[in-house]
Image (cartoon, rainbow, N blue to C red):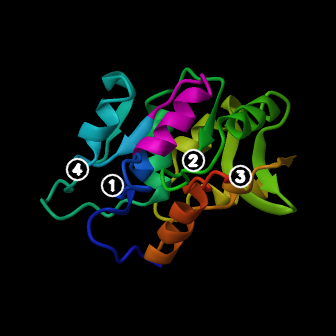
Amino acid sequence: MRFRGSGHKLEQKLGAGADTMLVRTLKHAIESRMRVVVVTTQALAPTVGKLVAARDVVLLPEHDSQGHPSLVGMGHSIAAGVGASGDADGWLIMPADMPLLRPSSMVAVAKAIEQFPVAYAQYRGRQGHPVGFSAELYSELVGLQGDEGARRLVARYPAQAVDLDDPGVLIDVDTVEDLARVQDELVPEPALQKPV
């Protein structure tokens, strides 16, 4: 399902005066205190550049060598990000449409790939993001293409579930309705009035 709202889904505000989805997700990643490499489009690069060092921003090509629009998917994005940070001990793959994912969940998955080639966040038995890959999978990650992403690697290698008390590992925003649910989740509850 594709986002059918006005504008790019990652530029949607998460409430009045709130961050955009992209900014909130990036802030959470930065709060993890791990290196953050962002694979993005030219249109979103200015927003990313305000939070992430230029050396850690990887721009996807808008057109192929014949001038046609590039057909890139999650696999291409993963390959580009891993290729730009080949000296890392491992990588966490996290879509930018997950603004409720907690920094502590990212850190927990990163710790798991110190012992396992693949690890993923899990909430109440359901697999979510981020998904982590150890450095031993570098060659396979940089060879990914298309929309499949890294599913086949998760299936092929021993993968460790990291049980977390974070429903945000499952919540991505793909539709206007998803956005409304996330916005509702973030609305602060009104303060209780003291009886007089």
Would you say residue 145 is visible in this rendering? no
**Which region shows up in magenta?**
23-37
Tag 1 residue:
11
SS label for mark 1: helix
Tag 3 residue:
196
Q: Which mark is residue 43?
A: 4
- In the image, what residue type sits under mark 4? Ala
Residue at 36% from the left image edge and 22% from the top image edge: 53
Magenta span: chief secondary structure: helix
Q: Between disc 1 and disc 3, whose residue precedes?
A: 1
Spatial separation of the CA atoms under disc 4 and disc 3 = 54 Å
Q: Which mark is residue 193?
A: none
Judge the density around disc 1: few (<14), some (14-19), many (≥20) Cα neighbours within 10 Å.
Answer: some
Figure label count: 4
Judge the density around disc 4: few (<14), some (14-19), many (≥20) Cα neighbours within 10 Å.
Answer: few
| Image x and y of residue 146, in percent | 46, 62
Q: Are marks 4 and 3 in contact (CB under 8 Å)?
A: no
**Does the magenta segment cover residue 93?**
no
Would you say residue 31 is visible in this rendering? yes
